[in-house]
Each structure stands twice: as C-alpha cells, then as structure tokens.
Amino acid sequence: MSNKCVLIVEDESMLLLFASMALEDEGYHVHVAANGREGLRIAREQKPDVIITDYMMPEMNGIVMIQTLRDEGVMVPCVVTTAIPRDQLPDNAESVINFYIGKPYNEPELASIVRTALAG
C-alpha cells in the first residue's frame, strides 16, 4: 500500500467518484474537491504528492488553480484532465502542468499517469 496522497479536483461528480475509487484501489490516500477554489484550499492544507485536476470547472479552472499554487512555490506534479486537445489549452498551460490526460480516460490510464508522476 502507498502512503502517497493524491488530490483530485473535478466538477463532474461521477467522474470524481470513479477516479477517487480507482486510485484508492491502487493504495493511494485520496482527497477530492469539486472546483478549483476548493482544490486550492485542500492543496494548501493537505500538501498532496500529486494533483489531478479537470481544466474547465466553476469558480476557478484547473490551469489557474495550478498557476496559483506554482506562484506560491508548490511544485508537486500536476495532471490536467480535459476533453480539450492539449494544443488548444491556454498558452501558460505547458509551463505549469506536468502531465495531460484526455477525457474520457480509463482506470489503467489514470493509475499509470499517477505512478509516472510520483516516480518524478
């Protein structure tokens, strides 16, 4: 079992449930947030080892959330999940995210990218 902590920020409740259960099954300790503002708060409080965030969410999008954390000196690996093609993300996305995973994604894909992110 892993003692690594993963924060998942996702506004689609079924996808949030799927992702959190998949990563808990892999042995990770999982925190969840339903929007970028909540994700920012939890990231500051829990100091996760990796952050997985949706891009398009209410209150604060995933790129802005990660950029805010980067500006505060938080350099944990960050994975952005979205149905938007990577080359259509905002210009600053490449400088703040570490990994991209297109939606829809499956459990092995998610587990693999988290392992890769944590391997550093």
Image (cartoon, rainbow, N blue to C red):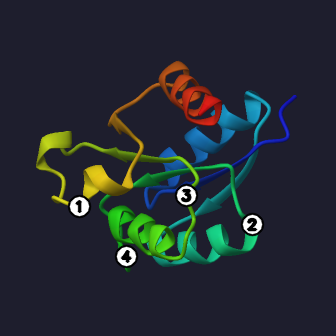
Quadrant including the N terminus: top right
In primary-sequence order, the first of circles 3 and 4 is 4
**Residue depth check, mark 1 versus mark 4: number of the one nearer the observer:** 1
| Residue shown at the point (51%, 55%) measured from the top left | 13
In primary-sequence order, the first of circles 3 and 1 is 3
| Contact? badges 4 and 2 (CB < 8 Å) | no
Q: Is residue 10 above or below residue 80?
A: below
Say the numbered circle drawn on residue 60: 4
| Residue shown at the point (23%, 61%) measured from the top left | 92
Q: Which residue is mark 3?
A: 75
Q: Is residue 33 left or right of residue 66?
A: right
For label 3, the crowd category at 10 Å Cα-Cα, with few meaning under 14, some 14 to 19 and many 20 or more, is: some
Which amino acid, mark 2?
A: Gln
Q: CA distance from mark 3 to mark 1?
A: 15 Å
Q: Which residue is mark 2?
A: 46
**Residue depth check, mark 2 versus mark 3: number of the one nearer the observer:** 3
Q: Which residue is mark 1?
A: 92
Q: How many marks?
A: 4
Q: Is residue 53 left or right of residue 93?
A: right
